[in-house]
Image: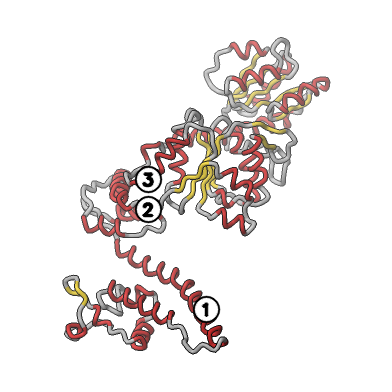
């Protein structure tokens, strides 16, 4: 990121030092505004916020440390570089503990000062852009679409917990809208005037997650060429949303627990303990209790996160909300793509409402975006056949493992029965096969082959299914469907079922 044109304030009572620093900064393409005292700095009108302040520690009257504390009180988040003489070391140490970015000893090396200023500007701009992007976000409570009882219960819990500062744990499958619920809690809290800060723990490499969360000092690790403020500090006095908290590595979990208990932490590479006032909302789609049993997640951290759990229902449990969501997404994407879509066919809406949506709201949104792209007229054209194909693939994949487990269990029981001298061999597996085949035949109206046939629905080869039906004495013609009735054996003989 270019720092050309960035504004730097220089506060120093020594006119030679003050003007020398200002000239150096201007020669490097930066803007500089100078002040001869702390009082002058505080009284002067500032039309543009600076990206960095170069501040002499030993100022008359309001000294550098006092000035830094005044800035902090006024919520001005600007990195400060202290210039100090050799005799000012004790005051400088106090300043650094209070949050100063860096300090340089006079006489200052020009290149060292420029490098320090550039690092401050880069860090400041990154934080500013992050915060502005969050402020520009249009998410609010009204973005939660739905009127189902399941969703209404969730929103009632949101209303209940939002005014408190209690930790909230959002549980639910991927794509159910956990971030929207987290934002709703923040927007209804006493911290709503502050920036909502978020971090997806699964999206950050393990080696960088600690730095993203707690920040680091220059030189803390290879590649740490400057100081970094972590999300925990950015969220001071506000709300921090940790998505996918179940993916936090075990070595970082104790540090997060400490923040929850003590509201304090240290940046990587620093011994200075920083106090924060952060309201934490965590979310996960993983089974944390099972992870505790597998020693993948600390039980004490779980209990500290689980103060106020809210379980977000999957979309299949709030089907009455699907038409509202579909309409909302169609309007959204039609507007983006400058299309005029006026109607959603009833058959399309019925198909969308009947689908299970394993990816929940996110899957529905992506599907509607694709449908809007494909639509040429004023009526939504949704590729429902894609849902049926993905259903067949998903069912075959999901069914494979349980079937294998059932076979192994039944074989084991049969062997044990034989060892006990029992002669009745279990036919449980055959009965289960029969039920699965009959169900698939009913759904396919007696059709064995083809894209919508029973074989495709079960995820097996057509000839394999025919062989199994012969062994089990199943006649597919019995399940041919006319007018909603299953045909008798005699009536079925009149139909030629594709196989």
Q: Is residue 398 left or right of residue 476?
A: right
- The dot on residue 373 is none
Give whichever of 263, 341 is nearer the camera.
263
Query: Measured along the vertical axis of the image, is residue 254 above or below residue 387?
Result: above
Name the spot of residue 251 as percent of width and height, x first: 68, 50
Q: CA distance from mark 1 to mark 2?
A: 34 Å
Colour mode of the rendering: secondary structure
Question: Dot 3, how many residues are within 10 Å of its Cα: few (below 14), some (14-19), or many (20+)?
Answer: some
| Image mark for residue 315 | 2
Which residue is pictured at 58% across the width and 31% down the height? 236
Residue annotated with mark 3: 151
Mark nearer the viewer, 1 or 2: 1
Which dot marks residue 408?
A: 1
Which one is in front in this view, the residue at disc 3 or the one at disc 2? 3
Number of numbered discs on residues = 3
Q: Quadrant of the N terminus?
A: top right
Mark 1 crowdedness (10 Å alpha carbons): few <14, some 14-19, many ≥20 = few
Q: Residue at x 71, y 10 (%)?
A: 61
Residue 203: image location, x then y, percent:
55, 50
Q: Position of residue 498 (x, y in %)?
A: 25, 82
- x then y, percent, for residue 284: 52, 50
Q: Nearer the viewer, residue 23 or 345?
A: 345
Residue 333 can be seen in this image: no
Q: Secondary structure at mark 3?
A: helix
Image quadrant where one finds the C terminus: bottom left
The residue furthest right is 87
C-alpha span from label 3 to label 1: 41 Å
Can the viewer see residue 198? yes
């Amino acid at each position: 990121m270019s720092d050309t044109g960035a504004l730097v304030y220089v506060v120093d009572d020594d006119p030679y030092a003050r003007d020398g620093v200002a000239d150096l900064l201007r020669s490097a393409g930066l803007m500089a505004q100078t002040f001869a005292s702390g009082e002058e700095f505080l009284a002067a009108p500032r039309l543009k916020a600076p990206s960095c302040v170069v501040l002499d520690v030993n100022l008359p009257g309001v000294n550098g440390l006092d000035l830094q504390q005044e800035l902090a009180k006024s919520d001005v988040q600007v990195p400060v570089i202290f210039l100090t003489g050799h005799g000012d070391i004790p005051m400088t140490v106090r300043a650094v503990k209070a949050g100063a970015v860096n300090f340089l000893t006079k006489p200052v090396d020009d290149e060292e000062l420029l490098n320090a200023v550039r690092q401050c500007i880069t860090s400041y701009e990154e934080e500013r852009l992050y915060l502005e992007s969050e402020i520009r976000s249009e998410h609010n409570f009204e973005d939660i679409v739905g009127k189902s009882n399941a969703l209404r219960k969730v929103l009632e819990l949101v209303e209940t917990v939002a005014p408190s500062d209690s930790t909230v744990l959002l549980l639910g499958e991927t794509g159910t809208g956990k971030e929207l619920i987290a934002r709703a809690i923040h927007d209804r809290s006493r911290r709503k005037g502050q920036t909502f800060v978020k971090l997806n723990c699964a999206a950050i490499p393990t080696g960088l997650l600690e730095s993203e969360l707690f920040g680091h000092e220059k030189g803390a690790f290879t590649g740490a060429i400057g100081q970094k403020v972590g999300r925990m500090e950015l969220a001071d006095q506000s709300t921090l949303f940790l998505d996918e908290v179940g993916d936090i590595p075990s070595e970082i979990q104790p540090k997060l627990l400490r923040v929850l208990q003590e509201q304090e932490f240290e940046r990587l590479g620093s011994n200075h303990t920083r106090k924060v006032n952060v309201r934490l909302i965590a979310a996960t789609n993983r089974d944390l209790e099972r992870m505790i049993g597998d020693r993948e997640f600390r039980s004490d951290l779980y209990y500290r996160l689980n103060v106020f759990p809210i379980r977000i229902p999957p979309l299949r449990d709030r089907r009455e909300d699907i038409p509202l969501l579909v309409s909302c997404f169609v309007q959204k994407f039609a507007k983006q793509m400058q299309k005029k879509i006026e109607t959603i066919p009833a058959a399309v809406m019925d198909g969308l409402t009947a689908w299970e949506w394993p990816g929940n709201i996110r899957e529905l949104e992506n599907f509607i975006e694709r449908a809007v792209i494909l639509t040429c007229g004023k009526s939504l054209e949704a590729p429902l056949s894609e849902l049926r194909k993905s259903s067949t693939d998903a069912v075959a994949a999901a069914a494979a493992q349980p079937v294998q487990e059932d076979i192994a269990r039944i074989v084991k029981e049969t062997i044990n029965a034989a060892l006990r001298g029992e002669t009745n061999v279990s036919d449980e597996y055959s009965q289960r096969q029969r039920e699965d085949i009959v169900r698939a035949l009913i759904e396919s109206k007696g059709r064995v082959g083809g894209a919508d046939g029973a074989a495709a629905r079960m995820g097996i080869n057509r000839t394999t299914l025919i062989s199994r039906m012969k062994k089990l004495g199943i006649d597919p013609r019995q399940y041919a469907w006319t007018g909603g009735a299953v045909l008798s054996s005699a009536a079925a003989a009149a139909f030629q079922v594709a196989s």
